[in-house]
Amino acid sequence: MRRTRRRWRAYLALTKPRIIELLLVTTIPTMILAADGWPGTWLLAATLVGGSFAAGAANAFNMYLDRDIDRVMNRTKQRPLVTGELTDRQALVFATVLGVGSVAWFGLLVNAMSALLTLGAILLYVVLYTMVLKRRTSQNIVWGGVAGCMPVLIGWSAVTGTIGWPPFLLFLVVFFWTPPHYWPLSMKFRQDYARAGVPMLPVVADDVRVARQILLYAAAMVACTLLLVPVSGLGWVYGVTAVAAGAWFLLACARLLRRALHPERGKLAAMKVFHGSITYLTIVFAAVAVDPLLPL
C-alpha cells in the first residue's frame, strides 16, 4: 500500500501540480468574463479537468526531456525520474496518455476550437520551449512562455467557440507577466542553471540588466490590464484593483532594480518579486472574475 501511494505521488509530481493551479487561476475568471456571468458548472468543470490533463501532460513531457539537467540541479534533483521512482518509459507513456486524453476530452465534451488550442498549448511547451528554446537562448522563457498564456484562450473559446480581443489582452497580460515571474526565480537559482548549461537571462546577464528587463515587462503587463477595461467592458471594481495591484507590483520591481544598482544596500531579494508576481496575478484575475458577477 505504501509503495502504491509513493508511485501515485510520483506520477502526480510529474504533472507539476503547483503550475497547474496557477494556470487554472487564469482560466476560471476568463470563462466568467466570456459568459458575462457564471458560464455553467458543467462547462467550467469540463474545461478545468481537460486543462489540468493538458498541463499535466506538457509538464510530464518536460520532465522526461529535461531529466538529464534535472540530475545536476539542486532544485530538481528530487524529481521522480532523477530518484528512479518512475522509469523513463513510464513517464513517457503517462505523458502521452494525458496529452491525447486532454485533446480528446475537449473535442468530445467542450468544442473543436478548445481542442485545437489545447493541442497547440502542449506542442508549444514541449517542442518550442523544452526542445528548441530552453537550452539555446536567454529569451527561452519569453517565447516559450506563450504556452502558459494559452489557458485564457482555451477558457474563452470553451464558452464562446471563438477568440476575441478581450482574451487576446488577457493572453498578453500572462505573456508579459512570465518574465517578471520566472527571471527572479532564475536569479535565485542561477548557479543551478549555469551548472546545467541552461542560458536563462540571469545566467548570461548581470543583475542590473535582468532587473531592468523585469521592470519593462511588468510595465507592459500593467498597461494591458488597464486596456482591458475599455475593450472588455469591465467596471470600476476591476479598474481600481488593476491600478492598485499594478502600482504595488511595479514598486516591487523598481525596488529590485534599485537593489541591483546599489548592491551595498543589501541583498537582492529577488524571490520577493517571484512570490509577489503570483499574488499579483491572482488578485488581477480574481477581479476579472468578480466584476462581471456584481449587480452594478
Image (cartoon, grey):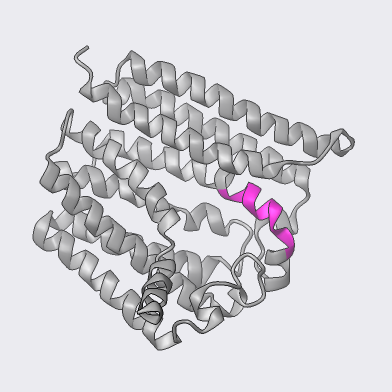
Task: Write down the quadrant of residue 128 in the picture.
Answer: bottom left
| Residue plotted at (56% across, 45% down) | 181
Q: Magenta: predominant secondary structure element?
A: helix
Q: Nearer the viewer, residue 9 or 174?
A: 9
The span picked out in magenta is: 182-191
Q: Residue furthest front?
A: 1
Q: How many marks?
A: 0
**Residue 222, position as x, y percentages in the image:** 49, 29
Res 271 visible: yes
In screen coordinates, is 202 left or right of 245? right
Residue 184 painted magenta = yes
Res 126 visible: no
**Residue 246, position as x, y percentages in the image:** 52, 26
**Residue 244, position as x, y percentages in the image:** 50, 19
Quadrant into which the N terminus falls: bottom left
The vertical placement of 139 against 155, above or below, is: below
| Residue plotted at (15% across, 42% down) | 159
The vertical placement of 141 against 246, above or below, is: below
In screen coordinates, is 265 left or right of 42? right
Residue 162 painted magenta = no
**Residue 43, position as x, y percentages in the image:** 13, 47
In screen coordinates, is 150 left or right of 113? right
Task: Write down the quadrant of residue 285 in the picture.
Answer: top left
Q: Nearer the viewer, residue 79 or 141?
A: 79
| Residue plotted at (49% across, 76% down) | 80
Q: Nearer the viewer, residue 99 or 231?
A: 99
| Residue plotted at (44% across, 62% down) | 16
